[in-house]
Image (cartoon, rainbow, N blue to C red):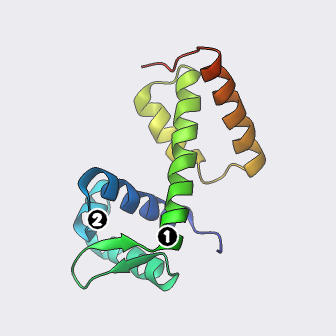
Amino acid sequence: MEKLSQSLEDYLEKVLMLHQSKGNARLKNIASELGVKAPSAARAMRELKELGLVEQEPYGLISLTPRGLSAAKSILGRHTLLRRFLSLLGVSEANADADACLIEHVLSKESLGCIENFVKSHVENGKSEKS
């Protein structure tokens, strides 16, 4: 699969998050959650559909294809890992989430692997994340 833009990754991640929290994803919810207008979200969904990552009923529900689900889980996994890492460093929950969203798109696999090892070692050693 070709590398998605940061924006398309955010849309894909949001579709998965809405499915997890609400059981479905609709264009208006995606737009609202990402703070964009519906036409912008519609363009992104068309692009993701052309890439074979989402399916959309006309004016209806948006679902992830198997490829889309795999990609979205990977993106959300990076986000969750980075949020936990920043939390371990003492960053506030709100800032950890916002910063994770920014840096999840640019880190190399090597850096992500090292961060994952760091987080695992701290969790195994009983260190807790800041709440």
Quadrant in the picture for the C terminus: top left
Provide the secondary structure element on which disc 2 rests: loop
Q: Where is residue 111 in the image (x, y as percent from the top left)?
A: 74, 42
Left or right, 15 with respect to 89, comes to left
Q: Is residue 97 above or below residue 91?
A: below
Tell me the tag on residue 26.
none
Amino acid marked by disc 1: Gly
Q: Position of residue 15 (x, y in %)?
A: 37, 62
Q: Position of residue 83 (x, y in %)?
A: 52, 35
Tell me the tag on residue 68.
1
Residue closer to the observer: 127 or 101: 127
Left or right, 44 with respect to 5, comes to left
Q: In this view, does 9 lie above or below 52?
A: above
| Residue at the image point whose x is 49% and y is 70% from the top | 68
Amino acid marked by disc 2: Ala
| Residue at the image point whose x is 49% and y is 72% from the top | 66
| Residue at the image point whose x is 32% and y is 73% from the top | 62
Q: In this view, does 12 lie above or below 92?
A: below
Q: Quadrant of residue 127?
A: top right
Q: Where is residue 67 in the image (x, y as percent from the top left)?
A: 53, 72
- The residue that mark 2 highlights is 25
Disc 2: CA contacts within 10 A as few (<14), some (14-19) or many (>=20): many
Q: In this view, does 126 lie above or below 120?
A: above
